Amino acid sequence: MSKTCNSYSKGQHIFREGDRVFGLFFIKEGRVKIVSSGFNNREQIARLATNGHIIGHRGYGNELYPVSAIALDETYVCFVDNSTIYDAFMNNAKFTYELMLFYSTELRKAELRLRYLAQMTMREKIAGALLYLLDIFGEDEQDGSLNVSLSRQELADLAGTTAEQVSRELTSFEKESIIAKHSRKLILLNHEELNKILSSHNMRIAASSWAAI
């Protein structure tokens, strides 16, 4: 098996949009944002990933990656080349079937996210993004803060809005005691209220439905 493992510092690219595809990446430890570039090179965070997640799978089977992967903090990633992945497909039917189901699920996530982002109010978008962060990264056992620190711009890139609108909504949530701010950390004080904000969509916008690939 051809496998290599490397460490990436915060802000370092694991792969870039337009890079040639040589295989798949598996996060052993760390946090990663998957981004695509839009108009005027503005980033859109398509997905967040952490321990045990696959990244780079959107590029597999194509020549170039359609997205970039950037480390959010110190991250340890293992890479498996195309030849090894191909051999696994040909020799392990269960593996191939499970990965097919994974791709199918990821496609459904992408379709749901497009639909809900088009229908959501600004308040709902921010609430959905916060619950997504909770589902992916969890909370710190000591202070209850989210186990990830994103800038207001990164939150905006995730929610499909602007940093200014994110700041306004977070301030509103704080006044309502739904969240608390501590430096760049966010503490979700009232999960139930965040879910109520999304109740008109008849679902909780969690990791299973918020993230596109």
Image (cartoon, helix red, strand yellow):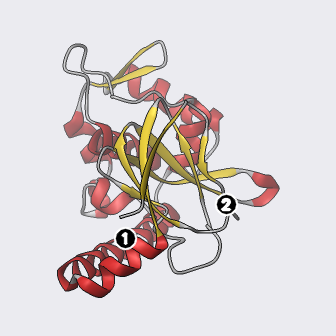
Q: Position of residue 212 (x, y in %)?
A: 45, 63
Q: Quadrant of residue 211?
A: bottom left
| Furthest residue toward right | 40
**Residue drawn 19% across and 39% down?**
192
* Element under disc 1: helix
Q: Is residue 170 visible?
A: yes
Residue that carries the numbered disc 2 in the rendered image = 17
Figure check: 98 above or below 68: below
* Element under disc 2: loop
Q: Nearer the viewer, residue 192 or 29?
A: 29
Q: Position of residue 49 (x, y in %)?
A: 39, 48
**Residue drawn 61% across and 37% down?**
12
Residue that carries the numbered disc 1 in the rendered image = 106
Q: Position of residue 149 (x, y in %)?
A: 45, 27
Q: Is residue 205 visible?
A: no
Q: Which mark is residue 153?
A: none
